[in-house]
Amino acid sequence: MLLLLIITSLILLIVWELWICEGAHLGRRVVVWLYDLAATRYDGIKHFDADWERQFLGEPLEKLLSDLPRPRLLDIGAGTARTFRALDKVSRIPNPEAGLHPPDKRLLVGVEPSGAMMELGRKKVGLGHEWVQGLAVPLPIAPASFDLAVCLEVLEFTPHPKRTIAEIVRILRPGGWALLTNRIGWQAPLIFGRTVSRQRYPAYLRELGFEAVEVFPWQVDYDIAWARKPWT
């Protein structure tokens, strides 16, 4: 009976760490290894809907980028190029009044630690995007060099979410914007030490250096936040 209880507990512990936490408490190497293994199945697991992604991710990003003369966007944890594909969906819609930038006027860079995910993302979007294999802490990016930073469904799987956010603040230009997700739902408290309640999240981002924080419901397991780096 005791042996059965131990075995059951170990199975539940493994399921918790690998399924819910995606190896977050086992270190960066384990997280990257798991994403390398799952790369070809990742989009199928996530069930991304192209039209939904265009409307609720691509269009808001494009609206912000279109106001800048030479916009620079950094996607942290770019994975299979989810953000880039959502933007591409918008830019391919004929609209002479949209004011969209030609590809050579914008810089889109993805940072991704998993080589397999990065190669798959590169194939999905082709030319016109730059990729850097690297970690969120430290980001292999110069300070104050991007207008917009995107970090979707990533923070809770980094070793130190606060340091990750500090890196995002560092690489943004004054007045630059960040688009971040916050894990919610019943699983969030089970990712010990890596999540923040939705009630506290706006103050949490302000404490870490952002202003003009706005948080919106987004998906079943995530809220999404816009936050700006102060001008001074």
Image: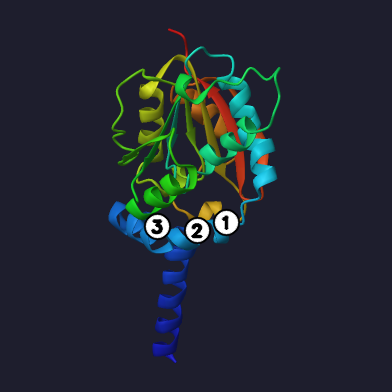
Q: Picture coordinates of residue 94 (x, y %)?
A: 69, 28
User: N-terminal of the two: label 1 or label 3?
Assistant: 3
Q: Which residue is labeled 1 in the image? A: 46
Q: Quadrant of residue 56?
A: top right
Q: Which mark is residue 57?
A: none
Q: Quadrant of residue 167?
A: top left
User: N-terminal of the two: label 2 or label 3?
Assistant: 3
Q: Picture coordinates of residue 59 (x, y %)?
A: 65, 30
Q: Amino acid at mark 1?
A: Lys
Front position in the image: 203 or 22: 22
Residue shown at the point (59%, 21%) measured from the top left = 64
Disc 1 on helix, strand or loop?
A: helix
Mark 1–mark 2 CB contact (< 8 Å): yes
Say left or right for 199 vs 27: right
Q: Real-space Cα distance between discs 1 and 3?
A: 13 Å
Disc 3 on helix, strand or loop?
A: helix
- Say if residue 89 shows up in the picture: yes
The answer to whether 118 is drawn above or below residue 190 in the figure is above
Q: Which residue is labeled 2 in the image? A: 42
Disc 2 on helix, strand or loop?
A: helix
- Say if residue 212 shows up in the picture: no
Q: Which mark is residue 35?
A: 3
The answer to whether 126 is drawn above or below residue 104 in the figure is below
Residue shown at the point (30%, 54%) measured from the top left = 27
Q: Amino acid at mark 3?
A: Tyr
Quarter of the N terminus within the rendering: bottom left
Mark 2–mark 3 CB contact (< 8 Å): yes
Q: Real-space Cα distance between discs 1 and 2?
A: 6 Å
Q: Amino acid at mark 2?
A: Tyr
